[in-house]
Image: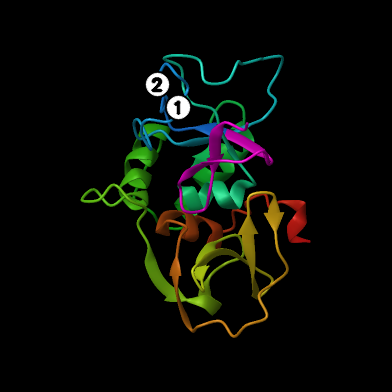
Amino acid sequence: MPHQNRVTPFSSIIADPARGLFMGNRGCLHGADGNIRRNCNGKRWITCLTRFKDRRRALLQPGRYTELFFLDEAVAFAAGHRPCAECRRADYERFQAAWRRAGLPDAPGADAMDFILHAARLDPATGRQRRFDAHAEDLPDGTFALIDGQPALRLRKAFLPWRPGGYSPALPCRIPQTVPVLTPDPFVRIIAAGYRPAIHPSAG
């Protein structure tokens, strides 16, 4: 039976056997029995490599961070996770550079960025994912929107429905002019400023 450790574009955590391209964490979310007890623990939400040096981890160790898995970096962005500054140092620095180009508030280090990103990813009143409306045609490739109730990736002027194991073919239906956006606003602006999130090969 798969662990509950797969992150969706809604930022929720589900059980699914697929693992995807990236690992990451948002603190210790599980109890001693290995079951998820909370959605987050702290403001540091990161996306990591699934392999780094010769490190090995047993999953869901008591008191240690909960290992989460993402189909790709576009999903990680939608869920509110930035690149890790250690195992993905080059991507982290590209993220910082795009942050500056996007005109976001000055945040020279990880702690300052995480403070700003956390406010953008969660509604403090409900603890749920923040969303905002935008023109579908204005969204850069690599962002997620809600189309007919399902998360879909914006790519090549189309929207590809997400599923845990990969993307389905582009939606043939007419896309509304305005759509709810799942990817938090700072990440959308960072993508628009030139950062290209890694996308799963199933997107074509």
Q: Is residue 145 visible?
A: yes
**Magenta span of residues:** 1-23
In the displayed image of the protein, which residue is found farthest to the left?
125
Which residue carries the number 1 mark? 35
Q: Are marks 1 and 2 in contact (CB under 8 Å)?
A: yes
Q: Is residue 15 magenta?
A: yes
- Horizontal side, residue 151 vs residue 105: left or right: right
Residue 148 placement (x, y as % from top left): 51, 74
Q: Is residue 103 above or below residue 83?
A: below
State whether residue 56 is above or below residue 117. above
Q: Is residue 131 above or below residue 74?
A: below
The x and y percentages for residue 185 are: 41, 59
Q: For residue 116, which quarter of the picture? A: top left
Quarter containing the N terminus: top right
Badge 2: few (under 14), some or many (20 or more) residues near its Cα, within 10 Å?
Answer: some
Main SS of residues in magenta: loop
Q: Position of residue 129 (x, y in %)?
A: 37, 53
Q: Nearer the viewer, residue 150 or 94?
A: 150
Taking depth in this image into account, of 28 and 33 the one nearest to the observer is 33
Amino acid beneath label 1: Asn
Give the residue furthest to the front: 1
Q: Give the numbered dot on residue 31.
A: 2
Residue 166's tag is none
Q: Is residue 52 left or right of residue 147?
A: right
Q: Counting other residues with Cα less than 10 Å from the Cα at mark 1, is it few (<14), some (14-19), or many (20 or more)?
A: few
